[in-house]
């Protein structure tokens, strides 16, 4: 091989290595996150993620789905980190070896919303289980997420506590995210269970009102979990842990606590309080 051709060949090889290295570095700065439609629909991520990206240099690719789907994506190694709200399912995910370093992040609560004329006459009730039982007895329209989301999981627990397996024309399973379900509920003049954050973000556009709230059973905590790199070596574990460290830090928690819609706080940060309580 002529010297000039050899040098050209070597130069091309070095260029390919540099490009490959740059692409790998770029990939390492991309964080794939699956999170609930409630965090997306509430608008919180529009405040939260740019601040994290600026502080860390990572770019976050978000897939908003129900909690069940988010955890399945983590189980399959399709994302690096999950931000969800179904503690029993989160604990099973970690116990099965799919996730590590689960941390508390924030909470709000669920509420039952319905039409102004309140055909089931449940407005003002404090017991969510009894309210759902009355909806079922009166066969008032109820729109369920029906998507294995954290909200859907909570709803199913409440029906089970009521001793009811909902079925019939009055019970509509949408298979949709929270925002879409609220729109459908308004159109059908029915009832649904929603997280308060999404409700506050959308309520001015809906012909609905809160009819049941304040039941301790409606507590709605959120957790963040890194996907286990022991199962998936290609997972961006460093990025996942950077996000977990930041969202549970004073900086991340402050953004969550300050986030408001029409003057209403949507989420209560819990990471620092729980960490402090665990120390003491």
Image: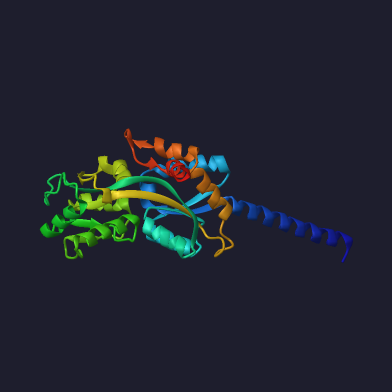
Number of on-image labels: 0
Q: How was this image coloured?
A: rainbow
Q: Is residue 118 visible?
A: yes
Q: Is residue 66 visible?
A: no
Q: Position of residue 65 (x, y in %)?
A: 39, 56
Residue beneath the point at 76% across and 57% down: 14
In the image, farthest residue toward the right: 3
In the image, farthest residue toward the front: 280
Quarter that holds the N terminus: bottom right
Please state if 45 lies on the left or on the right of 207 as rendered: right
Q: Quadrant of residue 68?
A: bottom left
Please state if 176 lies on the left or on the right of 5 as rendered: left
Residue beneath the point at 30% across and 60% down: 175
Q: Position of residue 232 (x, y in %)?
A: 55, 64
Q: Position of residue 193 (x, y in %)?
A: 25, 52
Residue beneath the point at 24% across and 53% down: 184
- Judging depth in this view, the residue of 242 and 25 nearest the camera is 242
Please state if 61 lies on the left or on the right of 210 as rendered: right
The vertical placement of 220 against 262, above or below, is below
Q: Position of residue 87 (x, y in %)?
A: 38, 55
């Amino acid at each position: 091989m002529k010297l000039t051709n050899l040098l050209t060949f070597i130069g091309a090889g070095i260029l390919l290595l540099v490009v490959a290295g740059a692409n790998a570095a770029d990939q390492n700065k991309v964080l794939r996150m699956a999170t609930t439609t409630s965090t997306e629909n509430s608008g919180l991520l529009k405040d939260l993620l740019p601040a994290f990206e600026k502080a860390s240099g990572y770019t976050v690719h978000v897939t908003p789905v129900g909690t069940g789907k988010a955890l399945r994506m983590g189980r399959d190694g399709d994302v690096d980190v999950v931000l969800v709200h179904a503690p029993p399912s989160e604990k099973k995910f970690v116990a099965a070896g799919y996730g590590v370093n689960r941390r508390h992040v924030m909470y709000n609560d669920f509420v039952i919303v319905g039409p102004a004329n309140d055909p089931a006459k449940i407005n003002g009730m404090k017991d969510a289980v009894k309210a759902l039982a009355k909806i079922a007895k009166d066969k008032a329209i109820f729109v369920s997420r029906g998507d294995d989301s954290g909200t859907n999981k909570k709803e199913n627990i409440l029906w089970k506590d009521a001793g009811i397996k909902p079925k019939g024309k009055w019970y509509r399973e949408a298979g949709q995210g929270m925002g879409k379900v609220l729109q459908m509920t308004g159109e059908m003049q029915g009832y649904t269970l929603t997280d308060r954050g999404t409700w506050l973000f959308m309520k001015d556009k809906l012909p609905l009102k809160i009819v049941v709230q304040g039941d301790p059973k409606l507590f709605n905590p959120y957790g963040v979990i890194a996907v286990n790199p022991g199962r998936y070596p290609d997972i961006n574990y460093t990025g996942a842990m950077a996000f977990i460290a930041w969202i549970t830090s004073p900086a991340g928690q402050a953004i969550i606590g300050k986030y408001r819609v029409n003057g209403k706080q949507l989420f209560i940060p819990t990471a620092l309080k729980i960490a402090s309580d665990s120390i003491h």
